[in-house]
Amino acid sequence: MAYTATQQTTSVWASIKDFFSMVGEAMTMSAAAEVRMRRIDALNAKTDAELAEMGLRRQDIASYVFRDLMYC
């Protein structure tokens, strides 16, 4: 019976690159979330009549802002 051992070696530089890549992704996601929250705040500041003109109800604001991330 033969046994084989495989070992992955990851360089320090690859680990550092991966770390900063993850940090960059987190910052991008955080910025995108902030933009969406500002959009929600702006829509919440509108009157019900203004929302109706846009075809929105107040309870649908979050769904409207996050519509590209949600499955219908």
Image: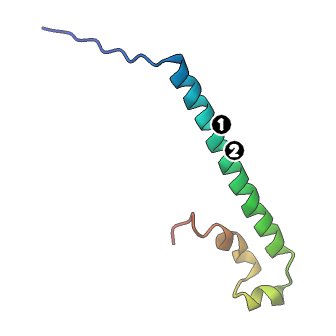
The reply to whether the C-beta atoms of the residues labelled 1 and 2 are less than 8 Å apart is yes
Residue 54 in the image, given as x and y percentages of width and height = 72, 87
Question: In percent of the image, x 55 and y 30: which residue is there?
Answer: 18
Secondary structure under the numbered disc 1 in the rendered image: helix
In the picture provided, is 49 more to the left or to the right than 30?
Answer: right
Residue 69 in the image, given as x and y percentages of width and height = 57, 63
Give the class, few, some or many, for how many residues have Cα within 10 Å of label 1's Cα (few <14, many ≥20). Answer: few
- Residue position marked by numbered label 1 in the rendering: 23
**Residue lying at the far front of the rendered structure:** 13
Identify residue type, mark 1: Val
Question: In percent of the image, x 80 and y 64: which residue is there?
Answer: 38
In the picture provided, is 13 more to the left or to the right than 4?
Answer: right
Identify residue type, mark 2: Met
Secondary structure under the numbered disc 2 in the rendered image: helix
Residue 43: numbered disc: none
- Colour scheme of this structure image? rainbow
In the picture provided, is 25 more to the left or to the right than 44?
Answer: left
Mark 1 to mark 2 CA distance (whole Å) = 6 Å
Q: Is residue 55 above or below residue 5?
A: below
Question: In percent of the image, x 70 and y 69: which residue is there?
Answer: 62
- Residue position marked by numbered label 2 in the rendering: 27
